[in-house]
Amino acid sequence: MQHTKREQTIALAGVFQAASLVEQIATRGMTNSAAIESSIESLFRFDVDSVESVFGNLAGVNTGLRVLSEQSGALSNDRNIDVTKYAIAMIALEKKLSANPEMLEQITDGLNEVQKSMEFFSLMHENVFAKIGALYKNTISTLQPQIVVQGERIHLSNDSNTNKVRSLLLAGIRAAVLWRQCGGTRWQILLSRKKYHEECKHLLAEL
């Protein structure tokens, strides 16, 4: 994969897309189903030739590009702190996951099993979210520090929402893998905000 700012921005937008969707489910109980589908699909695209194709196309990360643009271009008081917190946490967990080959293999095997079940259930079926959610709980959730999602109890106590949140967190970590492969580092989130903001504007103009 090319280590260009374009590819890096698309991958980071995938992280922020997952983070934003998690925040919306936790606080509102609902979010954009098309964006969820694009993020979840990325978990099953193992062999691709570009970051963009992980999300199907550029439109698949449209929500993430808008969120990343807003978060990187806004004044600190105007940013959604929870979205940024979730994104940073997913990037931190990805680093720990990359150092744990046994868990990586467990996740890969688990996703392959989920993919087999999609012969009977659609990608957005509750059973699929339940399987991905259980995979996250049995793997990523054992790493420290855990991601603590803040929101309304009525939404977070709903099993369907919990499974979607866990599935999206896994998708965000998948995007963090891509971002790191493209040369992304945690320092760049702080030091290259303007560059990411500008690249998001260019990418959104293509949609």
Image (cartoon, helix red, strand yellow):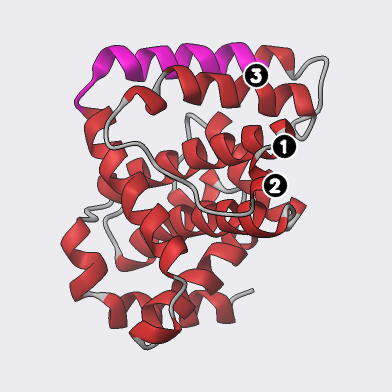
Pointers 3 and 1 in contact (CB under 8 A)? Answer: no
Residue drawn at x 34%, y 74% as measured from the top left: 196
**Within the image, what quadrant is residue 156 found in?**
top right
* Mark 1 burial class by Cα count in 10 Å: few <14, some 14-19, many 20+: few
Observer-side mark, 2 or 3, equals 2
User: To which residue does mark 1 refer?
Assistant: 158
The disc placed on residue 138 is none
| Residue sitting nearer the eye, 40 or 93 | 93
**Secondary structure state at the residue bearing disc 1:** loop
Q: Are marks 1 and 2 in contact (CB under 8 Å)?
A: yes
Q: Amino acid at mark 2?
A: His
Decide if residue 21 is on the left or right side of residue 13. right
Residue shown at 30%/38% (left/top)? 93
Quarter of the view holding residue 200? bottom left
Whichever of callouts 2 and 3 sits on the residue coming sooner in the sequence is: 3
- Let me know if residue 100 is in the magenta part: yes
* Amino acid identity at mark 1: Asn
Q: Specify few, some or many for label 3: CA neighbours under 10 Å numbering under 14, 14-19, or 20 or more.
A: some
Q: Give the residue pinned by disc 2.
A: 155
| Magenta extent | 99-115
Asked if residue 90 lies left or right of residue 28, the reply is: left
* Distance from the alpha carbon under mark 1 to that under mark 2: 5 Å
**Which sits earlier in the primary sequence, circle 3 or circle 1?**
3
Under circle 3, the secondary element is helix
Mark pair 2, 3: CA separation = 27 Å
